[in-house]
Image: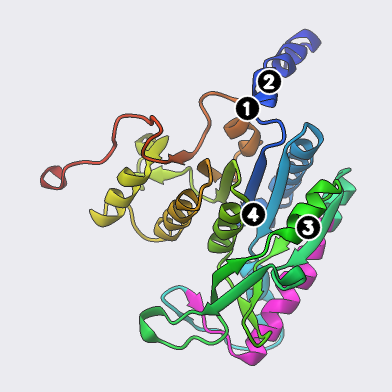
Amino acid sequence: MQTLYERAQTIAETLPYLQRHRDATVVIKYGGAAMTDPAVRTKVLKDVVLLRLVGLNPILVHGGGPEINAMVSRLGMETTKVNGYRVTDAAMMDVVEMVLAGLTNKSIVKDINGFGGNAVGLCGKDGHMLRVTKMMPDGVDIGFVGEVAEVNPRIIRDLIASGYLPVIAPIGFDDNEQSYNINADTAAAAIAGELKADKLILLTDVPGVLLDVNDPASLVSSLTVSDAATLIETRQIGGGMIPKIEACLDALHRGVGRCHIVDGRQPHGILVELFTDGGIGTMLVPDDVCAEPSPVMPVSAQG
C-alpha cells in the first residue's frame, strides 16, 4: 500500500501530462465490459469525470449491443446480422433508438452526474449532429443502418464551452429525417475527425492489437497508418479488430492527432494511456510521426 508521501509523489508526476493535455479534446468510444461490468463501469466513468475536472474535454460515444439484445429478447423479437451488422427494419429501429438514445444513454448520464460530473445525453439527431447515408454491405439491404456522411459539431462545442460533458448515442438521420443506427466505433471516429480531436480512444475487451491472438506478449504498442493498413492487407490481424483499426485510420485521415485502442477492462486504462509514457494499449499515429520499429512481417516470412 502506498504511503501518503508516495501517493503525493504519484500525483506530482502527472504534472507534465496535465500540462501537455490541457484543453485537449478526447473522444472516447465506450462499450464492452467497460459498460456492462458494474465494477469496471464505475472506474471508467469516474476516470472520465476526472479528465474533465483536470482540464481535458472528454466526449463519450457509446454502444449498446448487449442492451439491445436484452430488450429484443424481452419483447419476443428476433434479430439477424449480415456481415456483423444488425438487420434493422422499422420495428427494430424503434427498439434500437429507444435503448441507445433512451435507456442506455440516460443511464450513463445518471452515473456520470452521480460521480460529480456534469453530463448531457444526446444522439446524432440532436442539433442535426450526424447525417447519414444508407449502408449496403456487399449490396445487401440491411434496413436502417447508416454510415456517417456529415457531422455538425456545433451542439458538441456549445456544450463543452458551457462546461458540460457530452454523452452521445450513435443514432443518425437521413435527408428525410429517418432515424438510422450507426456503428459506435465509426460514429466516434467521424465525430473526432470533425472536431480535429487530439485523441480518439476506443475501449475494447482485448489488450490492443495482437499479432498472435493467443500471445499477450505479441501486443503492438504503436502503429503508423501505413503499418496498420499493411497488417490488414497481409491478414496479420483480422476479425473484430479490423473495424476498430479502420475507424482509427479514418479518424487520423480526418486530422485526429492520435488514436488509442485500450483494454477497457484494465483498471484506470484511460488514465494510464494518457498520463504515463508507456500506456497499455495500441496507439495509431500518422506516418510522419515516429512510432516503434515496424511490426509488419514481410509476406514471405509469414507462416
| C-beta proximity under 8 Å, tags 3 and 4 | yes
Question: Is residue 212 shown to the viewer in this render?
Answer: no
Mark 3, secondary structure of its residue: helix
Q: Which residue is mark 2?
A: 14
Mark 2, secondary structure of its residue: loop
Q: Residue at x 53, y 51 (%)?
A: 205
Q: Amino acid at mark 3?
A: Ile
Mark 4, secondary structure of its residue: strand
Query: Is the residue marked by circle 4 packed among few (<14), some (14-19), or many (20+) residues within 10 Å?
Result: many
| C-beta proximity under 8 Å, tags 1 and 2 | yes
| Mark positioned earlier in the residue sequence (4 or 2) | 2
Q: Residue furthest bottom?
A: 90
The x, y position of residue 170, in whole percent, is: 65, 67
Q: Which residue is mark 1?
A: 275
Q: Which residue is mark 3?
A: 108
| C-beta proximity under 8 Å, tags 4 and 2 | no
The x, y position of residue 300, in whole percent, is: 10, 46
Quarter location, residue 296: top left
The x, y position of residue 161, in whole percent, is: 81, 47
| Mark positioned earlier in the residue sequence (1 or 4) | 4
Q: Residue at x 65, y 66 (%)?
A: 64
Inter-mark Cα distance, 3 to 4: 10 Å
Which quarter of the rendered picture does the N terminus lie within? top right
